Amino acid sequence: MGCEPVEYTDVYTPSKYGIILKEKVFISPTEATGTYLNIHLMKDGKDLAALGIKRDFKLEVLDNGKVIQTKVGTN
């Protein structure tokens, strides 16, 4: 079943390390499920990447609490 895009905005108080967000996606065991996350880290309403500020990130995909994929990069 297709879904319309949803946009969330939240305020995050930075610390040295921290979880910015957690998202739970329910998938079908019989049909392919696609998910797209577009995350913009912003300060004072401006995208950090546009300001030339780089932030490291780590994205983990879990299946029943077990990490099945990890992505590490910089915005």
Image: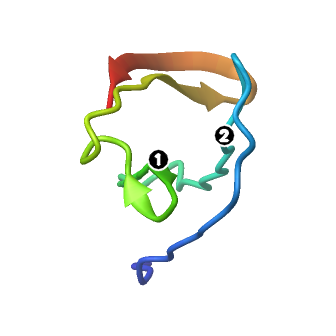
Is residue 33 visible to the viewer in this orientation of the structure? no
Q: Residue at x 39, y 19 (%)?
A: 71
- Judged left or right of residue 68, residue 55 is left
Image point (62%, 55%), residue name: 26
Residue 32, percent from left and from top: 35, 52
Where does residue 5 sit, x and y in percent of width and height?
42, 77
Taking depth in this image into account, of 52 and 73 the one nearest to the observer is 52
Q: Quadrant of the C terminus?
A: top left
Residue 6 image position (x, y, % from top left)? 50, 76
44 or 59: which is nearer to us?
Answer: 44
For discs 2 and 1, the disc positioned in front in the rendered view: 1
**Other-residue count near label 1 (Cα within 10 Å), few / some / many at <14 / 14–19 / ≥20:** some
Q: What residue does disc 1 label?
A: 41
Q: How many marks?
A: 2
Which residue carries the number 2 mark?
20
Q: Secondary structure at mark 2?
A: loop
Quadrant of the rendered image containing residue 10: bottom right
The amino acid type found where label 1 is placed reads Leu
- Residue 1 in percent (x, y) is at 44, 78
Element assignment for label 1: loop
**Are dots 2 and 1 in contact, CB under 8 Å?**
yes
Q: Name the amino acid, label 2.
A: Ile
